[in-house]
Amino acid sequence: MVYRLVVSPEQLSNGRIQLTTDQCHYLKRVLRFEDGDRFVAMDGNGQTWLAQLDQDQASLLNLLTESGELSTQVTLLVALPKGSGFEEIIRPCTELGVSHFMPVISDRTLLKPSPQKLERWQRIAQEAAEQSERQRVPTISPTLTFAEALIKLKDSGQIGYICVTRRNSPSFLSYLSTPLPETLLIATGPEGGWTDAEIEQAIAAGLTPVSLGNRILRAITAPTVALALVAAVAEAYSSP
């Protein structure tokens, strides 16, 4: 497997990458790379190159054509679970192809994240994107209240679904007809689920209540299940 490294646009100039101290350390000390060894460099926004290490820089050898992204851009609105639960959501959902995370504070959210959490969450998404050989790194927005997020969603006109339990709601899969829309939003709740008031607010904002099955899923399991359904439908449709 060829190692993949995300670089920022500021590091790219005249066909070369100016590696950071941490990147040099990881390539040379951890991976034991030597000058002339090759890896895949990605800008996190869809551009990917074969690169060759040269001291504290790397040369871009050629642009790679890859298609590891979903055909639909999925935004995942997540009511933050307790502890490090959101980190356990970021990894698998990045591997499955999510485009954007919207962490929110709901009525039953117990976690109150510090501003420094966002930087850590984004780093986890980058590592997961590198590992899963994606061309894009998902973005993570600053934490909002659920009400604030609904205002943003209502203005966007985006097709959206809110995953609920203990309601007579249709299966999420039944809404995933092909081809999928260009953009899609999925909202998943916290421990204990959404309150009735929050579900009604979501419906008023244009979100459709859906079920992920007859079993009650954990707050960190539901987002992965929802993304897996979208990825399965998207990739089945795009397969030759």
Image: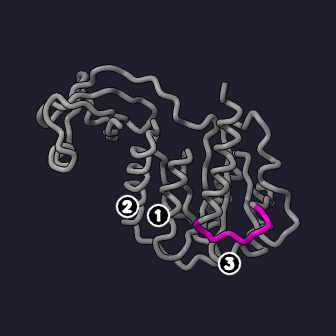
Badge 3 marks a residue whose secondary structure is loop
Alpha carbon distance from label 1 to label 2: 9 Å
| Name of the residue lying farthest toward the right | 168
Badge 1 amino acid: Glu
Which numbered dot is residue 192?
A: 3
Of residue 203 and residue 72, the one placed in the foreground of this image is 72
Residue ID for mark 1: 87
For the N terminus, the image quarter is top left
- Residue at x-position 59% and y-position 76%: 109
User: Is disc 3 in contact with disc 1, using a CB cutoff of under 8 Å?
Assistant: no
Badge 3 amino acid: Gly
Q: Is residue 109 above or below residue 148?
A: below
Q: Is residue 8 magenta?
A: no
The magenta stretch is 213-220
At label 2, counting other C-alpha atoms closer than 10 Å, the crowd grade (few under 14, some 14-19, many 20 or more) is few
Image spot of residue 100 (x, y percent): 54, 49
Residue ID for mark 2: 120
Badge 1 marks a residue whose secondary structure is helix
Image spot of residue 3 (x, y percent): 32, 39
Q: Is residue 219 magenta?
A: yes
Alpha carbon distance from label 3 to label 1: 19 Å
User: Is disc 1 in contact with disc 2, using a CB cutoff of under 8 Å?
Assistant: yes
Image spot of residue 216 (x, y percent): 72, 71
N-term-proximal mark, 1 vs 2:
1
Q: Is residue 103 above or below residue 39?
A: below
Q: Nearer the viewer, mark 1 or mark 2?
A: 1
